[in-house]
Image (cartoon, rainbow, N blue to C red):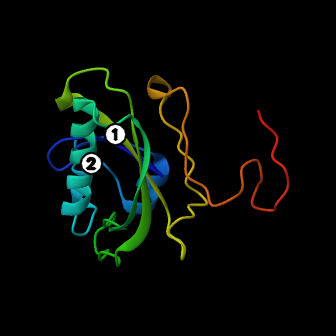
C-alpha cells in the first residue's frame, strides 16, 4: 500500500492508493497521515530529519526502511467501531528534490508486518512516474542474484 505525504507538519496526504483506502478507510486530500498512526511523533521526526538532511546535502535521496508503525483502520460506516491498530512495516522513498522544501513529497510504502523486521515480502516500491529515480535499492537478506527459492534470478 502506498501513500504520498508532504514532508512537513503532521504529514498532509497528497495521494493514497486504492489498497490503502480499502484497508484503512477513505482519505481526503490533505488529511493528515498522523490521524492514522498511533504515537506518530517518532515517524514524523524521522521523515522531517531525513528530508532536512537531503535538502542540506548531508544525505542522498533514496529508499529507507523506518520499521514498524501501528496503523489504525478508520470507521467507514455508521456504527462501526475502530479496529485495533495493525503493526505494519514502513519504508519511504525520499526522491531527488525538484522544488522548495515545503512542497517536498515522500512516498510511504505500508507493508505486511513480519516476524523478521529485515524482510518485507510485499514491500516493492512503485513510485509515481514523475518521481522514478535512476535506481531503487532495497536491502535484502538474500544472496545477490538469488530469489527466495534459491534459484538464479534473471535481469530484466
Q: Which residue is at the front of the view, 44 or 24?
A: 44
Residue hosting label 2: 47
Question: In x, y percent, where is residue 85?
Answer: 34, 74
In the rendered view, would you say 137 is above or below 117? Answer: above
Q: Nearer the viewer, mark 2 or mark 1?
A: 2
Label 1: element kind: strand
Disc 2 and disc 1 in contact, CB within 8 angstroms: yes
Residue labelled with disc 1: 106
Which residue corresponds to the image point at 81% horizontal and 46% vertical from the top-left?
Answer: 153
> Who is closer to the viewer here, 66 or 8?
66
> Considering only order in the chain, which callout, 1 or 2, is on the residue closer to the N terminus?
2
The residue located at (31%, 67%) in the rendering is 75
Q: Is residue 30 left or right of residue 2?
A: left
Crowding around mark 1 (Cα neighbors within 10 Å: few <14, some 14 to 19, many 20+) is many
> What quarter of the picture does the C terminus occupy?
top right
Where is residue 86 drawn, in percent x and y?
40, 73
Q: Which residue is at 57% across, 48% downward?
A: 124
Q: Position of residue 7 (x, y in %)?
A: 24, 41
Q: Position of residue 30 (x, y in %)?
A: 22, 41
Amino acid at each position: 500500500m502506498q501513500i504520498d505525504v508532504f514532508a512537513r507538519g503532521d504529514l498532509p496526504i497528497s495521494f493514497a492508493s486504492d489498497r490503502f483506502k480499502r484497508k484503512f478507510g477513505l482519505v481526503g486530500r490533505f488529511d493528515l497521515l498522523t490521524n492514522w498512526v498511533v504515537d506518530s511523533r517518532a515517524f514524523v521526526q524521522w521523515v522531517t530529519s531525513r528530508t532536512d538532511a537531503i535538502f542540506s546535502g548531508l544525505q542522498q535521496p533514496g529508499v529507507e526502511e523506518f520499521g514498524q508503525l501501528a496503523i489504525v483502520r478508520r470507521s467507514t460506516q455508521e456504527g462501526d467501531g475502530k479496529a485495533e491498530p495493525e503493526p505494519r512495516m514502513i519504508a519511504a522513498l525520499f526522491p531527488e528534490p525538484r522544488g522548495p522544501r515545503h512542497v517536498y513529497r515522500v512516498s510511504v510504502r505500508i507493508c505486511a508486518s513480519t516476524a523478521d523486521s529485515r524482510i518485507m515480502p510485499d514491500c516493492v516500491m512503485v513510485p509515481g512516474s514523475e518521481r522514478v529515480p535512476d535506481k531503487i535499492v532495497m536491502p535484502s537478506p538474500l544472496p545477490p542474484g538469488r530469489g527466495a527459492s534459491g534459484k538464479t534470478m534473471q535481469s530484466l
